[in-house]
Amino acid sequence: SQVSPFYLVLSMWVGALITCAMLKPGTSTGTKYTPLEMYFGKSVIFLIMGLLQSCVTIIGAHILGIYIANEAMFILSCLTVSGVFMILVYSLVSALGNVGKAVAIVLLVLQISGTGGIYPVEIMSPIFNILNPYLPMTYAITLIREAQLGLIWSNFIPALIILFALGIVTVIVSIIIKEKADKATHYFENKLEESGLF
């Protein structure tokens, strides 16, 4: 059977989001660690969780009998996509706390419509046509689709490079933000807990 690559990619983003909601990336405020040490120290745990989640997706695809044209590239693509997604979501939450979770959810909603996963982006609102090249899922879907349905290197390589570039840029920006906003994020999260709303 065939399942749209969009649903496989969507499961990885949702998995990263749930992981970052369940496990706290934390702030360096009140600890002996610098924001940089806190960021990279915790990132290892989240990255491992992301790779384990991709294994669940891969196993699930085989259990469901999904057609896969290139087994090795499919596994590699799933590991790459899940790892990059986890880095993106983890970086947002680590740098911005609960605001980062909200941003990740907004990105999820935009990507459902803006990546052509459900309907072709050409028939959607013009705003989604504008956003499409800037959404991580656009390139993740390309990776999974090429590996699943038949590999065309001229499509696969650019998507892989852009996905890695998005991950690297996110890490750099998140480190800069975390260095400057860690105390404010810690204060905001404490007040939120004290409010009893969450």
Image: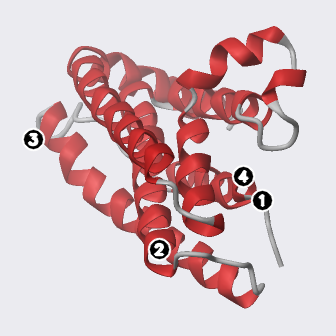
Q: Please, what is the three-letter code of the amino acid marked with disc 3? A: Lys
Nearest the viewer among 69 and 189 is 69
The CA distance from mark 3 to mark 4 is: 42 Å
Does residue 24 appear in the picture of this structure?
no
Mark closer to the observer (1, 3): 1
**Horizontal arrangement in the rendering, residue 36 relative to residue 84 (left or right):** left
x then y, percent, for residue 42:
27, 52
Q: Is residue 152 above or below residue 51?
A: above
Badge 2: few (under 14), some or many (20 or more) residues near its Cα, within 10 Å? some
The CA distance from mark 4 to mark 2 is: 16 Å
Q: Secondary structure at mark 3?
A: loop
Q: Please, what is the three-letter code of the amino acid marked with disc 2? A: Ile
x then y, percent, for residue 127:
76, 10
Residue that label 1 marks: 4
Q: Secondary structure at mark 4?
A: helix
Could you tell which of marks 4 and 2 lies nearer the N-terminus?
Answer: 4
Q: Are marks 1 and 2 in contact (CB under 8 Å)?
A: no
Residue that label 4 marks: 6
Residue at 28% over, 34% down: 168
Residue that label 3 marks: 32
Could you tell which of marks 3 and 4 lies nearer the N-terminus?
Answer: 4
Residue that label 2 marks: 75
Q: Secondary structure at mark 1?
A: loop
Mark closer to the observer (3, 4): 4
Could you tell which of marks 1 and 2 lies nearer the N-terminus?
Answer: 1
Nearest the viewer among 166 and 100 is 166
Quadrant hosting residue 164: top left
Badge 1: few (under 14), some or many (20 or more) residues near its Cα, within 10 Å? some
